[in-house]
Amino acid sequence: MTPSANPKTKPDTPASPHGGNIRSRLFPKGTIWILLLFSTISLCIALVGISWRAAELARADLQTEIREKAEIEARVLGEKIENALRLGIPLREIVGFEAVVYQLRDGDPDLVFAAITDMGGDILHAGGLPSDEIATALTAPSGNDTAYIVTRLNLPRAEEHDDIEVVLGHARAALMRPVTDNLYDIAIIFIITLALSFELMLLVLTVNVALPVRVARKVLGNVRDRKFTLLHGQSTHDEIGQFMERINSLINTTAKKVGTHPQREREVKLIGVRMLAFMFVLAEELARPIMPAFFSQVTSHSIDGQLGAGVVMAVHLLMVALAMPICSLFQEQVGSLRMYLCGAFLATLGLIGTAFAVGIWDLVLWRALSGIGYATTFVACQSYVLDATNDSNRTQGTAMMVSGIMLADICGPAIGGIVAGHFGPDMTFIAGATIAFLAVLLAFFLMDNMVRGKTPPPVPTRAALRAMLGNRRLQVLILFAAIPAKLILSGFLYYLTPMILLQSGATTAETGRVIMLYGLVAILTGWAAAKWTDKSQNETRAVGIGGGLTAAGLLLAGWLPEYALFAVAVALLGLAQATSIPAQLSASLKLSKDFTKDHGTGPVLAVLRLAERLGGAAGPLLAAGLTLLVGTTQAVLIFGVFAAVSVLCFELLIGHVPPEQKGEQKSEQKAQGGTK
């Protein structure tokens, strides 16, 4: 394939030994699982070592804190003993010591026992454990392998009496309490770290190993067939590249003798768009936790801070909603690479300007610029995937980009919160601008401009646009799948879920974990769902399954509004979106194939994205209105009924596989059967 050729047509692609075309796979068979296993093992070894060292460093500080707390508790017990002695009560006849110990344990669950001993070590009073067990613990050799951290406080008495000691024992397991109390957070951090390391390894190994080897296989196969028409064009500077350069020299020499003109063969770096999508979303999501407070502070000099923050965020969303369909119309004329460069550059300027904004008007301007940049880069990545894939792997390609975006949605707020806490909100926006600018530089390497067609499609006529908008099956897809999916996502996940969980007594951290389940489940299941969709070539069925899962989760959460069931509902929503969102894109293009064949995909994507954005904007408004009318729990139930009605209408009106597609599938199966 030459650099100017259309990547969708590859006549020289060899057949897979397992049947079918190797072009339909985005990765070599089994590679992704080897990468995941290697990433997991490497990360586990690294995290275990880091955690062990961190625990060793923190143990001394934690032990000091426990001893300070124990000294305070010992003084409380000592004061009560001294008060009793001042009243003339003999030391051995004091009662109620054990009750006081249990009161202390109510406020300090790590306290195991307390005792009063004389200077000879005899136990006079004990609480928490029997006296013989306390005596055994006190006589055990001290060290880090003991079960208790023992603290002693000497109480000097009058001259005619011996001194006594207050002894407290805390569980040594308390040193690991910060770890055991945050296992869920640690698990989430582990999964995020694993995902980030996997993304990096996947990019490096695919670009430097998988793609060069795949192209080398084609070139060597061409040499084996004595054609000498292909050269290795997947540039690498390692051993593979050096070896194939020698092969290229031999091919050139032989081609001159036989009179052929070999051309360089290369494959599109589709994996690169995953990293680019991750980076432009991460640049925006870093400041997500501090945006309302920061915007309120900046705009408070002009209008009410809360109102100003809402205006700024609304302008950003409005610009994203308007820019996406406009960019979709012009993408095929501009090209994915140039559009991504423009979008990332605009996002960089917008984020830098936001960091140094001093009033509402310049803040609105910079956030509007960021919104345009966000929309432009999104359309560029999406169009790049569409141009670099075909019907056999388009859903997988879309899922690859969507998973990068979802990973950024998970990692961005967590990382941004840490940056803001240590360096301030200004530096958080500057960090996002730095990532956006880095994306500009990486785009030259990760996004091939060769995926563009030779000539842009003609501008659609009014009649063509009316025919596209009048496509009944496309209307059904938009009205009963695309709009409800985004409406439920924004209304249920981002509005109703945190409100209900916080009102029910869940902490902010627990609420965040539940919401994070959406992205985690979507990332873990998206690839398998997309692969199944491409294999079955039945995108509308995948959309229907996603709608059914959404309805089931919402009805469950609305019927039994408990924390665990909300977590299940959010997880089902993540699975549903991972199944249906990539399939919606592929289905919209298939349902409009008569239009896209003559006028390109831009207008179809513009309509689809505009409808999705309108649904996303309507979700919180609908959720807020239902909350005022019927309450939060009933609002969730109504959302569930809406999801069920939508998917039912979708299934009844659109069908599963149109007759012409069934005919195409039968012909493809016959063709494949003839080649085996």
Image (cartoon, grey):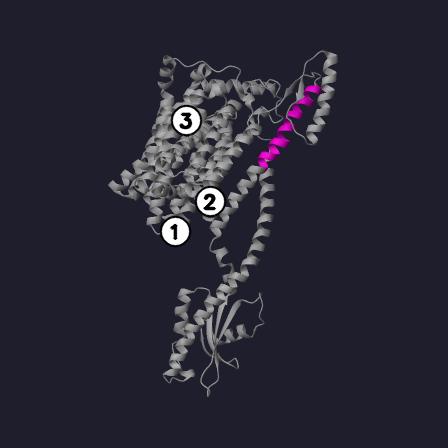
Identify the image quadrant of the C terminus.
Answer: top right
Q: Which residue is mark 3?
A: 324
Q: Amino acid at mark 1?
A: Thr
**Real-space Cα distance between discs 3 and 1?**
36 Å
**Circle 3 — which element?**
helix
The location of residue 583, given as percent across then percent down, is 45, 28
The location of residue 360, given as percent across then percent down, is 35, 37
Q: Is residue 484 visible?
A: no
Q: Residue at x 44, y 33 (%)?
A: 350
Q: Is residue 62 visible?
A: yes
The location of residue 277, given as percent across then percent down, is 49, 32
Please indicate whether residue 210 sits to the left or right of residue 660 in the image: right
The location of residue 47, given as percent across then percent down, is 57, 49
**Real-space Cα distance between discs 3 and 2?**
27 Å
The magenta stretch is: 201-224
Q: Magenta segment: does it hold 206?
A: yes
Secondary structure that dominates the magenta span: helix
Please indicate whether residue 390 sits to the left or right of residue 76 in the image: right
Q: Residue at x 50, y 34 (%)?
A: 436
Q: Amino acid at mark 2?
A: Ala
Q: Which residue is mark 1?
A: 507
Residues marked 3 and 2 touching at CB (< 8 Å): no
Nearest to viewer (mark 3 / mark 1) = 3
Identify the image quadrant of the N terminus.
Answer: top right
**Real-space Cα distance between discs 1 and 2?**
16 Å
Q: Which residue is mark 2?
A: 414
**Residue 365, quarter of picture:** top left
Q: Residue at x 61, y 25 (%)?
A: 16
Q: Residue furthest left?
A: 629
